[in-house]
Image (tube, rainbow, N blue to C red):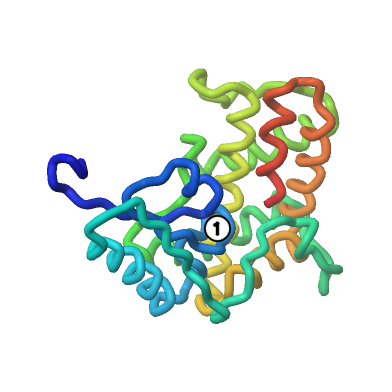
Amino acid sequence: MEEAGLVSTGIALVEEHARKIKPPRILSVPFNFGNTLGEVNNPSFQHEILEATFDLLDRAEGPVLEIFETDEIERVVLSRSEVKTAAVSKKEDTFVELANIEANYEKWLGMNKGRTAVGLSSIGIDQFPAVVAFLKEFIAGNTNDSEIRPEQFSIAHFIRYCVDDLKSYYLESRIAVDPKASMNELYRWLWSETAMGDLLGELAEVMNESEDKEVKAVAFGIAR
């Protein structure tokens, strides 16, 4: 692209990788995976990052590695072990909790013209109770597969994609009722105040002890 006269720029979450790959222009940001633009619900800060990224297009020669430094937002912490605190109220049954936040998720869809991060697993939200039932059985050691798993996914990746969808479902539901919540507040709620957070924590522990190398490898992203 560069040889053809098309200038390019981008954002890197891992500075070390950017230094090794040496793309023509790259902005290294100090945020966690999944948070390339820093913080949810903070458009002015996100625009600042995008502006810094596009400013690199003015650099005629490269490779250029620019470090984005900021004290405006706190470090985003996604890991359950880092943010979990004692629950302030009694948690509902996971299935009840799942059903109770559906209205909030529908509100999110209405607020965002139907856009959602849910869908990676290709499982509809109407099947989420079946997904949760499977995860509970998997944790208990009673099963290692699910009849709703699409053939194109291994069991390890099916679990990971389902977990990603469940987390998105919960977080989007929460944002719908608390649109000014910071990313850390959202994850603190998920990991500390919900039965789903507890379930995913148990799942991560079980997967991390698995003798299946693929299942064990996927465990890292379950509770974060």
Residue ID at (47%, 59%): 28
Residue wearing tag 1? 102
Expressed as whole percent of the image width and height from the top left, the position of residue 97 reads 69, 57
Expressed as whole percent of the image width and height from the top left, the position of residue 159 reads 64, 33
Secondary structure beneath dot 1 equals helix
The answer to which image quadrant residue 187 occupies is bottom right
Residue ID at (58%, 67%): 174
The relative height of residue 216 versus residue 108 in the rendered view (above or below) is above
Residue most extreme to the top: 151
Residue 97: in sight, yes or no? yes
Residue ID at (79%, 34%): 208
Report the side of 61 relative to 137 (left or right): left
The relative height of residue 60 versus residue 70 in the rendered view (above or below) is above
Expressed as whole percent of the image width and height from the top left, the position of residue 161 reads 56, 37
Along the line of sight, the residue nearer the viewer: 216 or 88: 216
Q: Which amino acid does label 1 sit on?
A: Glu
Along the line of sight, the residue nearer the viewer: 72 or 149: 72
Residue ID at (43%, 76%): 45
The relative height of residue 97 versus residue 87 in the rendered view (above or below) is above
Report the side of 39 relative to 83 (left or right): left
Expressed as whole percent of the image width and height from the top left, the position of residue 136 reads 77, 37
Residue most extreme to the left: 5
Report the side of 1 relative to 64 (left or right): left
Along the line of sight, the residue nearer the viewer: 112 or 81: 81
Residue 103: in sight, yes or no? no
